[in-house]
Amino acid sequence: MEKKNKDKIVINSSNLIYNIYNIGKVLASFYSFDDIFIFENQYHSEETIGEIIKDFLEKNSEEILKKKLNIKYFNKNNLSFYVQKDENKFEKIIYYNATISSIFYNIQDTFHLLRSSSTAISNLMFLRIYIIYKRIEIAEKSDEYIIKKTNLIGKPIFNTFKYYLYNKISKKLRIIKYSMEDIKKSGINCLSTIDSYCNVKNSLYIYQSNSKNSNFDNFFKIDLLNNKISLISSKFPKRILKSMIYIPKYYIFIIGGKNVKEVIKYNIKIDKENYKKYPYLLPYELIEPSLIFINSKYLYAFENSTLEFHILRADLNYISPFEDIKLANSKYIYMNQKFFGVVKSNNSILFLGGQMINSNKEFINNCYEYDYIDDKLIISKRGFRSFDFVEKTFIPIDNELYMQIVEFKKLNKYEPKVIFFESKK
C-alpha cells in the first residue's frame, strides 16, 4: 500500500462551530494505516472527538490493539489519531475537545470524510479515523549513518573553556578555545566530573549542572564546524552522574543519575528547548551507566557501581520497557571492572578502560566483554588499561573502526589520547 503522508491538522478554535449540520448520528470507524479495520460505533454529532477516542480505548483491550496494530509493546500514550484530508494526505487530530460536527465543518470539502448514507437510516454520517502507533525513527544502519554524517569528534577538557577536536579526514587532533562572546552569551561553564556529553554529527551536546539554579540544569550544543556555542535549554531536570548516547537519526538518550529512574529522550530535529520522557522507567537507578546501541535496535545500559553488575536492554524499534538481563553464567564469573567505555566487537560488547577494583575475590586484570547472543560475561584476552571515559560509547568512523578521545595522566599533567578499536581484529 502506498505510504500515507501525515501532517498535523490545525483547527482554529474560532472555527469550532457547533450544529453546523443537523447530523444527528455518526458512525465512527477506526482503522490502522494499513487499512485494517479495528472498531466502529455510533455516536451523536455533538460528542467530542476525545469522548470517541476514550470509548475506543475502553472497548478495545491492549491485546486486541497489539495484534491489530502489529506492535510488540503497547502504551496508549503512543497512539496518534488522524483523519483523511484528501486521497494522499492525512492530518493529525490535536484538539480532542472539538465536537464531531465541528470536525465535519473543518473537513467538509475533503476526500471520503463526509458522505450521505445509502442505508435506510436517515442522517447517519460516516467518519473514518486512522490510528498510528508512534515509534522512534531510527536509521536502518545506525553505524553507517554516523560514519557518513561525522567528520569531527570532540571532547570537552575538564576545568577549562577548551575542547579537543579530532578530524577523521586529516587525522589531526587540535585544542579549540571557546569564544569569549559565546561563553558570555550562552552561560556555559567549564566541564566538571558531574556533567556529561555526547557527539552528534559534527556537534557536541553537553548536559551541564547549573550551580545558580537548584531545580534545573543547562543543555548546550557546540557546533564543531564553526565553534559556535548555543544554549538549548536552561530547564533540563537536575541530575548528576548520568550518561548520554546518540541514537541516529534524531535522538539523544540521557540515562541514569543519582536517585533517578526517568529516561530523557531529546529530538535534535524538532524539540528545540523541549525534551520528552521515555514512556518506561528504569527498574532501578543507574550511576554513570555505559551505553551502546546494537544492530539499530537494542539500547544496552551497563552499570557496576554497587555490589551487583546490572545489564538493561530496551528495544527502541518497539519502544519497549527496559529489560533486566540475567547473565547465563553469573554464578561462575565475578565482574570487577567499573565505569568502562563500550564498543562492539563481533557478537559481543567489549568493556574498555574505567576502573578495575581489587576485591577479596579472585582478581583478574583483563577487560571483560558481554556476549549479547548467549547473554554471557566473558574475560577478554585484552589486558586492562585505565582510561576515564565520560562519553562511554565508542564512535564509528569507518567500517568496523571505532574511536574515542580520552585524557591520561603523564608527569602530573593530563594529555589527550585518541583510542582506535578495530572490531575485526
Image: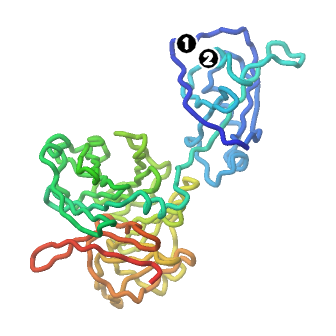
Say whether marks 1 and 2 touch (CB < 8 Å): yes
Residue pictured at 69% horizontal, 16% vertical: 45
Reading the image, the residue beneath label 2 is: 106
Residue pictured at 66% horizontal, 42% vertical: 3
Q: Position of residue 24 (x, y in %)?
A: 74, 13
Reading the image, the residue beneath label 1 is: 15
Q: Position of residue 214 (x, y in %)?
A: 21, 44
Q: State the residue in front, 288 or 204.
A: 204
Q: Earlier in the sequence, mark 1 or mark 2?
A: 1
Residue pictured at 56% horizontal, 43% vertical: 78
| Mark 1 neighbour class, 10 Å CA radius: few under 14, some 14 to 19, many 20 or more | few
As measured in the structure, the alpha-carbon distance from the residue carrying label 1 to the one carrying label 2 is: 8 Å
- 160 left or right of 28 in image: left
Q: In the picture shown, does residue 347 fall above or below 164?
A: below
Which amino acid, mark 1?
Asn
Q: In the picture shown, does residue 100 fall above or below 307?
A: above
| Mark 2 neighbour class, 10 Å CA radius: few under 14, some 14 to 19, many 20 or more | some
The quadrant of the picture occupied by the C terminus is bottom left
Which amino acid, mark 2?
Asn
Q: Position of residue 8 (x, y in %)?
A: 55, 30
Secondary structure beneath label 1 = helix
